[in-house]
Image (cartoon, rainbow, N blue to C red):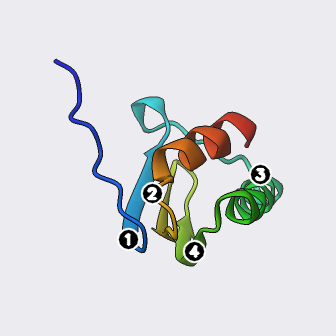
């Protein structure tokens, strides 16, 4: 069964989670985390997002993302495809 489409609104704040397959590690070290944060900074520049909070752990991460435009899905595809 297909997942329901995400409702996107300008000015919304989203709690985004990404977890490794079978809860496997997605970060080997702080350099990996730094690369994700650098790519996230670039995503924010491209999309106009603001990220008031983040939490990066070995096997997953949480982001609070505030969008100015309804562009969460497009931005996340770019972020995860480039990190």
Q: Which residue corresponds to mark 2?
A: 70
Query: At 72% from the left edge and 46% from the top edge, which residue is drawn?
Result: 28
**Which-is-in-front pick, marks 4 and 1?**
1
For disc 3, the neighbor class at 10 Å (few under 14, some 14 to 19, many from 20) is some
Of mark 3 and mark 1, the one earlier in the sequence is 1
For disc 4, the neighbor class at 10 Å (few under 14, some 14 to 19, many from 20) is some
Mark 3–mark 1 distance (CA, rounded to whole Å) = 28 Å
Q: Are marks 3 and 1 in contact (CB under 8 Å)?
A: no
Depth order, front residue of 73/23:
73
Of mark 3 and mark 4, the one earlier in the sequence is 3
Mark 2–mark 4 distance (CA, rounded to whole Å) = 15 Å
Check disc 1 and report its element: helix, strand or loop.
Answer: loop
Q: Which residue corresponds to mark 1?
A: 12
**Which-is-in-front pick, marks 3 and 4?**
4
Q: Is residue 63 positioned above or below 74 on the image?
A: below
Residue 59: x and y in percent read 52, 48
**Which-is-in-front pick, marks 2 and 3?**
2
């Amino acid at each position: 069964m297909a997942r329901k489409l995400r409702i996107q609104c300008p000015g919304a704040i989203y709690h985004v989670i990404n977890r490794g397959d079978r809860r496997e590690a997605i970060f080997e070290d702080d350099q990996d985390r730094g690369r994700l944060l650098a790519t996230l900074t670039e995503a924010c520049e491209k999309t106009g997002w603001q990220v008031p909070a983040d939490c990066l752990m070995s096997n997953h991460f949480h982001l609070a993302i505030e969008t100015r435009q309804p562009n969460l899905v497009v931005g996340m595809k770019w972020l995860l495809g480039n990190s």
